[in-house]
Image: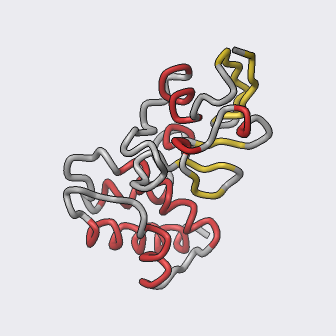
Amino acid sequence: MARYTLRVNGERREVDVDGDTPLLWVLRDELGLTGVKYGCGVGLCGACTSHVDGEAARPCVKTTAESVRTRITTVEGLSRDGDHPVQRAWRELDVAQCGYCQPGQVMAAAALLARDPDPDDAAIGEALRDNVCRCGTYPRIRDAVRRASRIMREER
């Protein structure tokens, strides 16, 4: 066990864990950031999607030791008041059904819009293709990404 300093949601956070502890468990169990969901544990479902250095990443397959010199953002850190354009679009279009996958979907969508503020349907599909929604809300998710893109353009 060792002490690791992580930069999470804009704050320096210290944790005492084994270096090979998956970042997912540090975020959830050590730091209380439960918006990061456990789905598969092998990086396939997207439920844990967060941002690492601004890119969508899967904390279930990243170790704490390899995450030390990175900037980690979870859904809790996407905006202070839940007013990020993606979060607003999600609420406006009532995207969530059960909601379990939604934090990962939101984070994947936010990463996409950060690098491509006006994605076409193919880009949306590619960015979100590995985020599984067991309830099948994919049409609402795509609509929300398009709506978030419009919100971002309107606010420029």
Which color mode does the image show?
secondary structure
**Residue 92 x/y as whole percent:** 30, 59
Dividing the image into 4 quarters, which one contains the C terminus? bottom right
Q: Is residue 155 above or below residue 78?
A: below
Could you tell me which residue is drawn at 30 percent across and 44 percent down? 100
Quadrant housing residue 69: top right
- Measuring from the top left, give residue 106's x and y in whole percent: 44, 55
- Which x, y percent locates residue 14? 71, 19
Q: Position of residue 34 (x, y in %)?
A: 43, 31
The correct choice, above or below, for 82 with respect to 115 in the image is above
Picture residue at 24% right of the left edge, 63% below the top? 137
* Quarter of the rendering containing residue 26: top right
Image check: 95 left or right of 68?
A: left
Q: Residue at x 64, y 18 (%)?
A: 17
* Residue at the limit of the structure toward the right, as seen here: 69
Q: Is residue 4 left or right of residue 61?
A: right
> In the picture provided, is 134 more to the left or to the right than 75?
left
